[in-house]
Amino acid sequence: GSRLRALHVNLSNPLGGLDQLLHGSTGLRGWGTQPAPDPVLYYVRGFDASAQKFLYDVNPRFGATDQSRTLVRAPFRATIDFSFGLTPNVAQQQLERYLGPGRGGRPGPRLTVADLVSRYSRNVGDPYQAILSEADSLLLSRGQVDALRQAGVRYRQRIDSLWFGLATNFAALAERYDVASAVKRQEDAIADAREITRLHMRSTLGDILTPIQLQLMPGALTYRSTTPLTAGGRTLSP
């Protein structure tokens, strides 16, 4: 069924609401409101045709900022925003797409270890391949291209080992399995993969690329990040 995913109470100009509560509408102090002095000094009250001139009255409220006598106010508002999730979260949906076929009476064959490795590896792009694909734009030298390829081989050895461990565990799951535990293992693996990627980039690219290339390369934000790339329980793209 649906689940409450977020509930927010928002207050707009709480000082204005407190002013109204404590002093009433006729004794407002103007809390939470930018003073707006009355800018009109004279009001036209008529025209003297014989003298060919307008007749004026002085505005007694000229320069006044009394909030109880002005229509220009910042209102107090209280709103409640909430959202319901009508489907499982993204992490669980991904898990069920990969592990659902062939289990629990669902149609289709189970994904093999190789299938799972292929699919989970899509969660984290290969930063070295991405940089090499921009070789012309980044003006990479032959030496830089060779160094990036070598670094990419070492990176894929580490990252493939992580995905293989996750896929082997998932491929061996029974017809019925603990979904919450499997989701946690999946998300932990994705977070670990992103952290491996971030740390590997930081340990190698500074010695291969120039400062300008580091600024312009794909994944520059990941390279500059000094903390793991996670937010709200779901990992972010590098």
Image: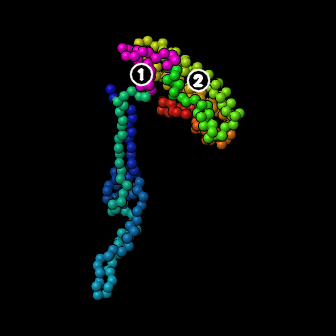
Q: Is residue 90 visible?
A: yes
Amino acid type, callout 2: Ile
Find the residue positioned furthest to the bottom. 50
> Residue 225 magenta-drawn?
no
User: Left of 175 or right of it: where is 162?
Assistant: right
Above or below residue 34? Residue 145 is above
Quarter the N terminus occupies: top left
Quarter the C terminus occupies: top right
Quarter of the figure with residue 70: bottom left
Image mark count: 2
Of residue 198 and residue 211, the one placed in the foreground of this image is 211
Amino acid type, callout 1: Glu
Residue 163: percent from left, percent from top: 54, 21
Residue 36: percent from left, percent from top: 40, 62
Residue 179: percent from left, percent from top: 42, 19
Look at 40% across and 14% down and name the residue there: 103
Q: What residue did someone put label 2 on? A: 159
Q: What residue did someone put label 1 on? A: 96
| Residue bounds of the magenta highlight | 91-115
